[in-house]
Amino acid sequence: MLPLKIGAALMVADLPTYRDWLIGDQRDLEVQDFLRPEVLLGDWQAVVTEAKRHLDGFEGRLGIHGPFIDMTLDMADPEIAPIVSRRFVTAVDAATALGASQMVVHSPFTTWDWFNFGNDPEIGNTPSARDRKIARAQALLGPAVARAETCGVTLVIENIEDIDPGTRRELAASFASDAVRLSIDTGHAHYAHHATGAPPVDYFVTDAGPMLSHVHLQDADGFADRHWPPGRGTVNWHAVFRAIAALPQRPHLVLELRHAADIPAAMAWLEREGLAC
């Protein structure tokens, strides 16, 4: 039932500002520093230590954002794919060290893919373009999934350019693992709806159903990836929150805003609308 308790996706540098707000109601938190290549290639343990220092007393649900810059899940290059695969394993190790139960990874499906999957149909025993893409993602992410299963971490696949939410759901289900679930970014879905003919944001939520474990809450205008506070753009937030409230589970719900300083304005608007608390 509404309103739903929500938290935020933050860099470690922003934790002191929002520490009391997070801990006061033990809100969902996603630490995002681990998406930066230099963090996972460097002393990521120091980042974990610093985050823990600020989170003493935090007992809410905790996740991290995994790597994605030039880290596509379906990397086909045989020299580069093992590097990408190892990076995701390192990110799972960082999540485990932090005590996080989730890690966000990005969907490999592009706008071009959706318009061209039917342009490369399955012929005889030859796998389709869709199946080949899923197979590459399974191979690349497989070691991270295996590590996540042993560490109690769930990888959640976030929509980026996805037009058909069912394709990403099919990818997540193909791992046949409780350690792989779905994430939705509301602004990405809103862009895809307006710019490329995807369904509206609440349809993404309904399609994900019981597999939805994480949501990035951000507003947009349907043209670009704005990461505005809810209420500033044109996302139908009442439809989105009703769809989330109708789920049998409660996914991690975090504001992912371009400017962390907009969190109070976002919360004020959502509270006035009776959607979040």
Image (cartoon, rainbow, N blue to C red):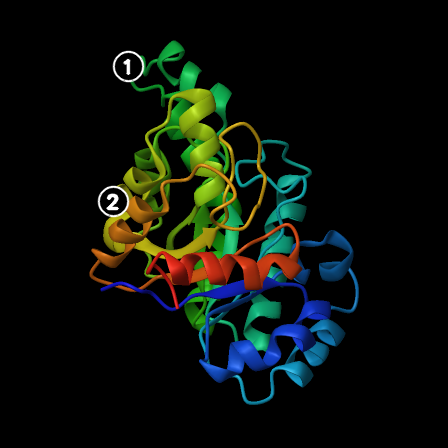
Graded by Cα atoms within 10 Å as few (under 14), some (14 to 19) or many (20 or more), the crowding at tag 1 reads few
- Residue 229's spot in the image, x, y percent? 54, 51
Against 109, residue 126 (above or below) is above
Q: Amino acid at mark 2?
A: Thr
Against 46, residue 105 (above or below) is above
Answer with mark 2 or mark 1, whichever residue precedes in sequence. Answer: 1
Q: Nearer the viewer, residue 156 or 186?
A: 186
Residue found at the very far front of the displayed protein: 272
Mark carried by residue 124:
1
Residue occupying image coordinates x 37% and y 63%: 276
Q: Quadrant of the C terminus?
A: bottom left
Residue occupying image coordinates x 47% and y 73%: 151
Left or right: 193 with respect to 206?
Answer: right
Q: Quadrant of the N terminus?
A: bottom left
Graded by Cα atoms within 10 Å as few (under 14), some (14 to 19) or many (20 or more), the crowding at tag 2 reads some
Left or right: 247 with respect to 120?
Answer: left
Mark carried by residue 179:
none
Against 7, residue 157 (above or below) is above
Asked if residue 64 can be seen in this view, the reply is no
Q: Nearer the viewer, residue 172 or 257?
A: 257
Q: Identify the secondary structure beneath mark 2.
A: helix
Q: Of circles 2 and 1, which is in front? A: 2
Residue found at the very far bottom of the displayed protein: 57
Against 160, residue 184 (above or below) is below
Q: Nearer the viewer, residue 189 or 115?
A: 189
